Each structure stands twice: as structure tokens, then as C-alpha cells.
Image (cartoon, rainbow, N blue to C red):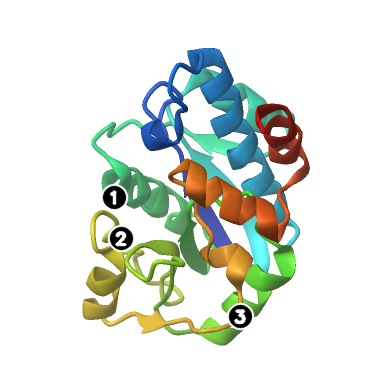
């Protein structure tokens, strides 16, 4: 078995993703480019984190599949096509069927300011416990980790932080602003910009603002 966590990053099709982030009157192509850049920067930072064995994307979007394949990132098709939790359960089962995979986690795709050292520190703080990291509002979840050799059992959705805590997951507390700063709205994107965006997202934000 490999050491380190195998992280699943689920992403909706681009025309459905991050609708609250779409600026009034913005072209669909511009919104798709922003969502794609955010996801690419998130995955690139996660792959560079100590303690991450692999990052796998699960999506049914053809453009995203091509972009991540060009980066050398494995993409699993979202064949359930039944929402975030079902996509994660599907990918989790596929990964855990591989002999080399010991531990699986889920990382949200909207962390464009993610710093590898923040993710690495959170993984270290988790130890071997089922654990989760709440978002900066304290209601959502940006990272969920299963116990080694155990199913992920995701509970994403409204109030996911409380739902994961009720499931027995340990709350990860730490000064990891970049791991907590998920982006759903323009205000969130401004907060991420203050932390320091990944290169692709930064280029688009400079043009936008």
C-alpha cells in the first residue's frame, strides 16, 4: 500500500457549476473559464502538498476532462450523475478497490488560494482519524478524510460541517485560511484574492477587476 491520502475532487459540468459566482451579464464562456481556472489551481496546489499520494478528479464534463488529462491528472467519469455525494461514493469505491490505496479523502474544487503547506498541515493534524475541515463560515466542508481502509461516507450539502461532525469525524482546527476559503460568490473570490490566488485564477481576476 502507498502512504499518503488519495484525494477525490468532484466537479459539476461547467454549465451547472458555481452559478452564484456568475457575474450579472457575464458570458457563459467567461464563467466557464473562471470555474476551470479555479479547479485547475486547486488541484495543482493539492498535488504539491506533502502527504498527498494522488489527486483524482470526478466529473462528466468533457472540457474539464481534457484539461485535467493534459495535466496528467486521472479523471473518473461521474457515471451516477446523481449529485456530489453519489459522485464521491462512486469514486471512493473505485479507488478503494485498488490494492495500493490505503486512505481516501474528498477535497472541494473551489479553493483557488490553496497553499500546499496548509493542506499538508491539515493532513498531519488528522492523523488516522476520520476528519473534516470546515469552511471559513463554519457551515460547509472543504476537506473530508476517511479512516484508513474505510469508506469515505460523504455528507456534503447544506450544513455539511455539522453533518460530518455528527458522523464521528474530528474537526480540524488550525490556521489554514487557504484551505478554508472556498469560493461560491464574488465576495468569496475577493477573500481568496486577498490570500493570494493560484496563477490561472489570478490572471482572470486581474482582467475582471
Q: Which mark is residue 188?
A: none
Task: Confirm or deny contact between disc 2 and disc 1 (CB under 8 A).
Answer: yes
Q: Which residue is mark 3?
A: 175
Location of the N terminus (image quadrant): bottom right
Q: Which mark is residue 154?
A: 2
Image quadrant of residue 65?
top right
Pointer 2 or 1: first along the chain: 1
Residue found 43% across the figure and 55% down from its top? 97
| Left or right: 59 in relation to 154 | right
Task: Confirm or deny contact between disc 3 and disc 2 (CB under 8 A).
Answer: no
**x then y, percent, for residue 179:** 57, 65
Task: Confirm or deny contact between disc 3 and disc 1 (CB under 8 A).
Answer: no
Residue found 71% across the figure and 62% down from its top? 115
| Left or right: 63 in relation to 132 | right
Q: Residues within 10 Å of mark 2 (few under 14, many from 20)?
A: many
Q: Which residue is mark 1?
A: 85
Residue found 62% across the figure and 22% down from its top? 66
Give the SS element for disc 3: loop
Q: Is residue 81 above or below residue 172?
A: above
Pointer 3 or 2: first along the chain: 2
Q: Is residue 41 above or below residue 26?
A: below
Q: Is residue 39 visible?
A: yes
Pointer 3 or 1: first along the chain: 1
Give the SS element for disc 2: loop
Give the SS element for disc 1: helix
Mark 3 → mark 2, Cα distance in angstroms:
24 Å
Q: Residues within 10 Å of mark 3 (few under 14, many from 20)?
A: few
**x then y, percent, for residue 137:** 39, 66
Mark 2 → mark 1, Cα distance in angstroms:
6 Å
Numbered-mark total: 3
Amino acid at each position: 500500500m502507498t502512504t499518503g491520502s488519495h484525494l477525490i475532487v468532484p466537479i459539476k459540468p461547467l454549465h451547472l457549476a458555481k452559478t452564484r459566482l456568475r457575474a450579472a451579464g457575464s458570458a457563459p464562456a467567461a464563467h466557464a473559464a473562471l470555474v476551470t481556472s479555479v479547479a485547475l489551481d486547486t488541484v495543482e496546489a493539492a498535488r504539491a502538498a506533502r502527504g498527498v499520494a494522488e489527486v483524482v478528479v470526478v466529473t462528466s464534463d468533457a472540457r474539464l476532462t481534457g484539461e485535467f488529462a493534459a495535466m496528467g491528472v486521472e479523471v473518473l467519469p461521474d457515471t451516477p450523475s446523481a449529485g456530489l455525494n453519489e459522485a464521491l461514493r462512486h469514486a471512493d469505491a473505485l479507488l478503494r478497490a485498488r490494492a495500493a490505496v490505503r486512505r481516501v479523502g474528498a477535497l472541494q474544487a473551489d479553493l483557488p488560494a490553496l497553499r500546499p503547506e496548509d493542506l499538508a498541515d491539515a493532513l498531519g493534524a488528522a492523523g488516522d482519524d476520520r476528519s473534516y475541515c470546515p469552511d471559513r463560515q463554519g457551515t460547509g466542508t472543504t476537506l473530508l478524510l476517511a479512516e484508513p481502509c474505510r469508506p469515505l461516507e460523504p455528507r456534503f450539502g447544506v450544513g455539511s460541517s455539522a453533518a460530518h461532525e455528527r458522523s464521528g469525524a474530528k474537526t480540524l482546527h488550525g490556521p489554514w485560511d487557504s484551505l478554508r476559503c472556498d469560493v461560491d460568490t464574488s465576495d468569496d473570490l475577493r477573500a481568496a484574492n486577498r490570500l493570494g490566488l493560484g496563477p490561472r485564477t489570478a490572471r482572470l481576476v486581474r482582467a475582471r477587476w
